[in-house]
Each structure stands twice: as structure tokens, then as C-alpha cells.
Image (cartoon, rainbow, N blue to C red):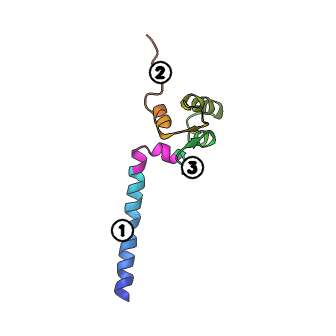
Amino acid sequence: MQKRFLIAAIAASLTIPLASYAAADAKKKGGGFAAADADGDGKVTQAEYVAAVKSKMDDKAAKARFAELDKDGNKSLSQEEFSAGSKGGKKKKDS
């Protein structure tokens, strides 16, 4: 009985750091979308987008950016639309 408890305790103590590592790895691999998709339904609504970027821009700017990114006009961002906004989304100025 004590061996089972010890094994379970060791397994639990190893699981926590692995889960933390996996979450950090997911964030590196496009976790911006996963973090913005608060309800986990595979799309980012305007409200989720505004909440996700609140530290970077005000509500009005976030809503305008959301409208630019929502290419298909379905009132939500797919991962592709979201990612397009984070990859070179800013236009260069002509010199």
C-alpha cells in the first residue's frame, strides 16, 4: 500500500512540470491564438480579441484591427486569420 502511494506521489510530482512545459511550448507555437480563444472553440470572437490585446491597444483600435483581420466577415477569426495579423501585419512606409 505504501509503495503504491509513493509511486502515485512521484508520478504526480513529475506530471506538474511536464504539463507546465507543454503549456509553455504551446504558447511558443502559436499560443497567441490559443490564449486569445478563451472558450476554446477554435475561433476568436471580437470580444476575445479585444480582451487579448488590451495591453497593446485600446478597445477602438482593437475592434478596427479585428475587422481588418476578419477577411471572410464571419465575425470571428480563424487561426489563419489571427496568425496573418501577427506576421508582418504592419505595412511598411514608402520612403
Residue 40 pos. (x, y %): 54, 51
Q: Which residues are magenta?
A: 26-35
Classify 10 Å Cα crowding around label 2: few (below 14), some (14-19), many (20 and above).
few
**Amino acid type, callout 2:** Lys
The residue where tag 2 is placed is 91
Tell me if residue 38 comes above or below residue 17 in the rendering: above
> How far, Cα to Cα, is label 1 from label 2?
46 Å
The residue where tag 1 is placed is 14
Identified at 43% across, 48% down, the residue is 27
Position of 66 with respect to 19 (left or right) is right
As helix, strand or loop, the secondary structure at mark 2 comes to: loop
The residue where tag 3 is placed is 38
Position of 18 with respect to 60 (left or right) is left
> How far, Cα to Cα, is label 3 from label 2?
28 Å
* Disc on res. 65: none
As helix, strand or loop, the secondary structure at mark 1 comes to: helix
Identified at 57% across, 49% down, the residue is 38
> How far, Cα to Cα, is label 1 from label 3?
27 Å
